[in-house]
């Protein structure tokens, strides 16, 4: 890239957006306590007649590229229940300079439940993306955290050869670290995903983490849905039970065929977010 083009990329207006939602249990059900929105980050609340409270996250910019910054913060109070999803798949476009950054901060009070269920992230060729997710759970709190990524839309003839993609999770319960992982791929994404030990040509991946003791009873049904293209396990860290499942597929459509029933299973009585089936 020439110095002139480099300067133009850096000076281009970038997205700096942030939104926060707080949910509390009041008068027998989960209700909105606070809502803050800044920039392109918006949160909408579809009408629901019973728990959990549903919220939809919207990036009004229509996608992310290098230099963009998007922050989501969710706080669920004691005994409250909330499920958050996105209006559509988040798209990460080619970066001319810098990384697109997403920061997610989640907290759940005692006896509460949070389902963090965004639709897939679609990464384009030469995209640069970095996401951090931190969750703090109180005693007896539960959380279902899902992130799925598709590296290029096969049906559109798109291929991802180059770029960077980083994802960092830190999950704590009662202040104790119960789950940590760092996923990083790039700059030769295409070559990496084609290796037998990594993707073996599969370009769509998903991670689902259920922090809950009930995960042990859901392990076998989860394994039946996952099948051979992925895996699921349950174990206990201290007094905290967690079920971890991973899926991979050759394209986003094939991934979603298993991802949707798995989310519905792990999300309990809330089932699958309505927007996922539209």
Image (spheres, grey):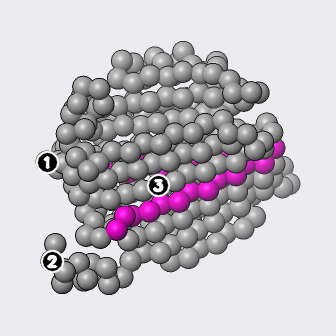
Q: Is residue 153 above or below residue 139?
A: below
Answer yes or no: do the residues labelled 2 and 3 have beta carbons within 8 Å?
no
Report the residue that reaches farthest toward the right: 27
| Residue numbers of the magenta segment | 98-122
**Dot 1: what SS?**
loop
User: How far apart are the two marked residues, 2 and 1, measured between alpha carbons?
Assistant: 29 Å
Looking at the image, tell me whether mark 2 or mark 3 is earlier in sequence order: 2
In front here: 199 or 205? 199
> Which residue is at 68% across, 31% downward?
212
Q: Position of residue 94 (x, y in %)?
A: 25, 63
> Which residue is at 39% across, 64% downward?
100
In front here: 122 or 261? 122
Report the residue that reaches farthest toward the front: 3
Mark sitting on residue 131 = 3
Looking at the image, tell me whether mark 2 or mark 1 is earlier in sequence order: 2
The number of discs equals: 3
């Amino acid at each position: 890239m020439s110095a002139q083009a480099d300067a133009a990329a850096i000076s281009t207006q970038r997205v700096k957006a942030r939104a926060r939602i707080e949910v509390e249990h009041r008068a027998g059900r989960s209700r909105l306590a606070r809502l803050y929105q800044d920039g392109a980050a918006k949160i909408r609340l579809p009408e629901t007649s019973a728990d959990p409270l549903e919220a939809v996250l919207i990036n009004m910019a229509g996608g992310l590229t290098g230099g963009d910054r998007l922050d989501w913060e969710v706080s669920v109070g004691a005994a409250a229940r909330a499920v958050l999803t996105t209006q559509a798949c988040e798209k990460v476009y080619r970066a001319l300079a810098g990384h697109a950054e997403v920061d997610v901060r989640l907290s759940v009070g005692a006896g509460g439940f949070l389902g963090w269920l965004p639709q897939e992230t679609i990464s384009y060729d030469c995209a640069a993306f970095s996401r951090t997710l931190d969750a703090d759970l109180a005693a007896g709190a539960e959380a279902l955290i899902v992130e799925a990524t598709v590296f290029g839309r096969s049906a559109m003839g798109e291929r991802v050869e180059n770029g960077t993609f980083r994802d960092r999770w830190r999950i704590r319960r009662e202040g104790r670290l119960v789950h940590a992982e760092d996923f990083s791929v790039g700059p030769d994404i295409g070559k990496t995903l084609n290796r037998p030990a990594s993707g073996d040509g599969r370009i769509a991946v998903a991670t689902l983490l259920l922090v809950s003791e009930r995960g042990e009873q859901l392990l076998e049904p989860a394994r039946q849905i996952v099948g051979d293209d992925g895996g699921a396990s349950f174990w206990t860290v201290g007094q905290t039970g967690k079920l971890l499942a991973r899926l991979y597929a050759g394209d986003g459509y094939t991934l979603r065929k298993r991802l949707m029933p798995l989310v519905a299973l792990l999300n309990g009585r809330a089932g699958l977010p309505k927007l996922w089936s539209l």
